[in-house]
Amino acid sequence: VLTMEKLIEILEDIQPDVDYETCTDLIDGHHLDSLSIISLVAEIEDEFDVTIPTVDIVPENFNSAKAMYDMILRLQEED
């Protein structure tokens, strides 16, 4: 089940020192590096049973927890 709380928990495990409730420049502000993103993609895919296509691994989809949440919802609907 997708919840924002679960998503934020995953984010905090990967990179703890960010306010995911309000941050909207996780990529553009260099809060998450490429290694973090790789980990994040794997965690999201495992946790929420989705496959994130390469075309979706772009800053717009990862700059905020809300953007990630929306992407996951869309991917779950497409399944």
Image: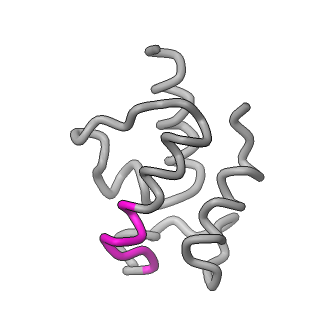
Q: Which residues are magenta?
A: 31-38
Could you tell whether 57 is left or right of 31 in the image?
left
- Depth check, front residue: 9 or 58: 9
Quarter of the picture holding the N terminus: top right
Q: Is residue 49 above or below residue 43?
A: above
Q: Main secondary structure of the magenta part?
A: helix
Residue at horizontal 56 percent and vertical 77 percent from the top: 15
Residue 43 is situated, as x and y percent measured from the top left of the image, at 53, 52
Name the residue at 49% across, 40% down.
45
Residue farthest left in this picture: 55
The residue drawn where x is 37% and y is 69% is 27
Q: Is residue 74 above or below residue 35?
A: above
Residue 28: % across, % down? 34, 72
- Colouring method of the image: one colour
Which quarter of the picture shows residue 52? top left
How many dots with numbers?
A: 0
Residue at image x 37%, y 80%?
30
Residue 40, position as x, y percentages in the image: 47, 58
Q: Is 36 displayed left or right of 19 in the figure? A: left
Q: Position of residue 6 (x, y in %)?
A: 73, 50
Image-based side of 67 in relation to 8, left or right = left
Name, please, the residue furthest toward the bottom: 17
